Image (tube, coloured by chain):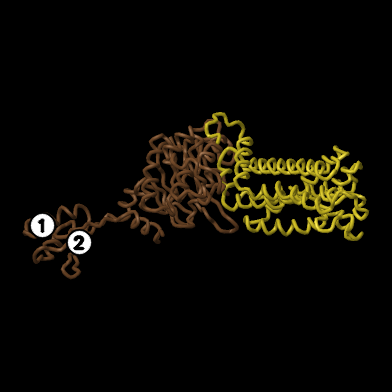
Chain colours: A brown, B yellow
Amino acid sequence: MPVIEVTNLRKRYRGNEAVRDVSFSVEAGEIFGILGPNGAGKTTTVECLAGLRRADDGRIRVLGLDPQHDREQLRQVLGIQLQESELPANIQVDEALELYSSFYPDPADWRSLRDTLGLAAKRDTRYSKLSGGRKQRLSIALALVGNPQIAVLDELTTGLDPVARRETWDLIEHIRERGVTIVLVTHFMQEAEHLCDRVAVIDSGRVVAIDSPGGLVNRVNAEQRLRFYPSAELDDRLLTDLPQITAVARHGRQVLVTGTGDVLGAVTSVLARAGIVAEQLRIEQASLDDAFIALTGQEIS
Amino acid sequence: MSSTTVAVGSPLRALTRTETRLLLRERAGLIWGLGFPPVLLIILGALGGKKPDKDLDGLTLAATYVPIVIAFSLAMLALNVMPVLLATYRERGVLRRMSTTPVPPSRLLAAQLLINLAVAVITTVVVLLIARAAFDVGLPRQAGGFLLAFLLAAAGLFAIGLTIASLAASGKVANAAGALTFFPMMFFAGLWVPRAVMPDALRHVSDYTPMGAAVQALQDSARDHFPGALHLGVLAVYAVGFSVAAIRLFRWE
């Protein structure tokens, strides 16, 4: 039973069509990614489903609610963390959490939320004095303080250092364990690969694919590449005779083998029989990045 | 702080409490809106002494300046403090964030109006008490007229301030626009040349400015007259006109 259903969504701003045709559905308890390059229409899509913008066309249902018609009810069950939404410079962490919890009829315990998000030591710190990572955590806390069933997180880790990013990812998985369905907007491949159960790839206002991150990769390119330095002279024909191998190339002493299926198993057994060791063996598989480029014809960032 | 209190009450109350804390923490708004007007009165009152001045319609310098510093406080809060804060909130997405919650950001605006009005009322009471205690200026004899003039002046000035907040894209722009509005208005209020000694032509212009009308209406009710229809009418027109403009122009993001 999907908790979010978006069908043929369209939204245009002054002649510029931000969203042309977007459809997807999100199941309860999922982490659903919306992936796309800047300007693809990701933020507009989630703003429409959160009732912050009125769609020009299409149908949206969130927990059975129409985001335009049932705005008030929707805001009680959907928490959203937006890009570039700050807080007053001098408000303290606890004050912000207490204030925002007063906006909801059945709020979460904001103190335990604060502790879960690792903000306990910063409870009396002013917003302007928080690091980027802590501001994001507070932002997540405010999106969750109303006890939502769905949380929408937009470009959550943009501008964070790698450590803070990892910590934020752990946090999101933790939130999912609490039973919250998460819609994650990102242009960051690694993030989608790491967190999302399914991903909708959006390009120029259209959905070009919806699948699991692994499914997207397989769909686009099942090719693998092996690089190694043979310990002794190697006849290329030993490799090209294998059914899994499509090409063998050499860069100096290095051998580059391209193929599909169990390339690694086939190559290593041939080499073992010939008494050759593959030194500095490396396997390259297609990543979500490659899949994305193949799907949209462009690099993401 | 009250981080241990359990019951939070209505969102408007929570917002008013939080915004009040922020105002106290910020200080600038309080210094100009609450601190400066009484200081100005004390300096001018000390300079002028307690003798009535024929040129000032038979009032002392202190009595002349009581309504002017009250109008100063209202204008400072309405045209500078509040628009800068609201424009900054919009610029930084504070209002946008609120619009994702069940409580609309209009409640934040209401809280701001309440707080600034409260500061203006406190300043007015302090100014009236100092004037009476230190400079023998009697409390307004037409209390009802004084209250009406004060509320109409507040309504007009806060409506103008909200219009500035509506049009300004950032806190900096609001700051500049507020100052550009504030100084000419204070001139017509008689901050540099009191209305009693203004040339007739200038005073006629002043009658039709919000601050000129406010100062005269407050001064009249201080002296046992009910404020004139002209000045109350001028204030009412500004209040209604700019309220309509602010409602039509205000953007949350």
Kind of residue at badge 2: Arg
Residue B111, percent from left and from top: 66, 40
How would you rate the neighbour count of disc 1 (Cα within 10 Å): few for under 14, some for 14-19, many for 20 or more?
A: some
Task: Name the residue beneath numbered marker 1.
Answer: A270
For residue A249, which numbered disc appears in the image?
none
Please give left or right for residue A158 compared with residue B62 in the image: left
Residue B98, percent from left and from top: 58, 43
Task: Name the residue beneath numbered marker 2.
Answer: A227
Q: Name the foreground residue: B78 vs B242.
A: B78
User: Chain for mark 1?
Assistant: A
Residue A121, percent from left and from top: 44, 41
| One can see residue B159 in this view | no
Question: In percent of the image, x 41 and y 49: which residue is there?
Answer: A200
Please give left or right for residue B251 compared with residue B70 in the image: left
Q: Name the foreground residue: A236 vs A39.
A: A39
Please give left or right for residue A53 compared with residue B181 in the image: left
Q: CA distance from mark 1 to mark 2?
A: 15 Å
- In the figure, A37 relative to A101: above or below? below
Question: Circle 2 sits in a helix, a strand or a loop, which is it?
Answer: strand
Along the polypeptide, which appears first: circle 1 or circle 2? 2
How would you rate the neighbour count of disc 2 (Cα within 10 Å): few for under 14, some for 14-19, many for 20 or more?
A: many
The quarter in which the C terminus of chain A is drawn is bottom left
Question: Circle 1 sits in a helix, a strand or a loop, which is it?
Answer: helix
Mark nearest the camera among 1 and 2 is: 2
Please give left or right for residue A61 compared with residue B58 in the image: left
